Image (spheres, rainbow, N blue to C red):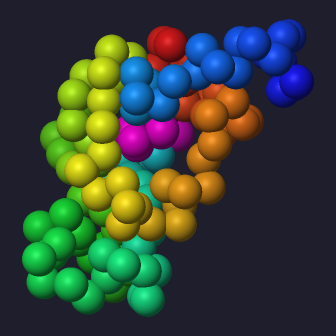
């Protein structure tokens, strides 16, 4: 059972294909004016591949990140947050994306920020 969920069956209700909240720049970043969300480290599948260059951008320090679209969502996210979503780079997603697991602390925080 996960802390704060109250019952193991509720984890199954946290369907990532209906959520997508973790694919949006968090409120604290947006409040600070930061448009940097998921870092893409050297050696990750997306890094250094010209075919994926439009999905990436470097910050002022030269650190590579997934590009965010105007509303703060990851450019790779397809669909409507909280309804039906998919990731166009799922098999290539960077480590930061892979760290979030359905029902973990980060997941629950992002869901709350998205009103889910």
Say which quarter of the image contains residue 107: top right
For residue 104, side relative to residue 51 (left or right): right
x%, y% of residue 85? 31, 30
Residue closer to the observer: 58 or 48 = 48
Say which quarter of the image contains residue 25: top left
Q: Which residues are magenta?
A: 22-28
In the image, residue 49 sits, relative to residue 71, either above or below, namely: below
x%, y% of residue 109? 63, 29
For residue 13, side relative to residue 92 (left or right): right
Does 26 lie within the magenta span?
yes
x%, y% of residue 77? 27, 42
For residue 99, side relative to residue 21 (left or right): right
Q: Which residue corresponds to the image point at 25% horizontal and 22% vertical from the top-left?
A: 80
x%, y% of residue 89? 29, 57
In the image, residue 108 sits, relative to residue 89, either above or below, namely: above
Say which quarter of the image contains residue 6: top right
In the image, residue 109 sits, relative to residue 35, either above or below, namely: above
Residue closer to the observer: 50 or 17 = 17
């Amino acid at each position: 059972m996960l802390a704060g969920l109250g019952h193991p069956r509720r984890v199954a209700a946290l369907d990532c294909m209906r959520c997508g909240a973790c694919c949006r720049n968090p409120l604290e970043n947006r409040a600070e004016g930061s448009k940097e969300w998921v870092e893409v480290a050297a050696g990750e599948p997306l890094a250094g591949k010209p075919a994926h260059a439009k999905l990436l951008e470097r910050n002022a320090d030269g650190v590579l990140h997934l590009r965010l679209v105007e509303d703060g969502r990851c450019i790779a996210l397809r669909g409507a947050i909280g309804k039906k979503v998919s990731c166009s780079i799922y098999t290539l997603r960077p480590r930061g994306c892979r760290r979030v697991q359905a029902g973990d602390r980060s997941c629950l925080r992002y869901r709350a920020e998205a009103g889910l």
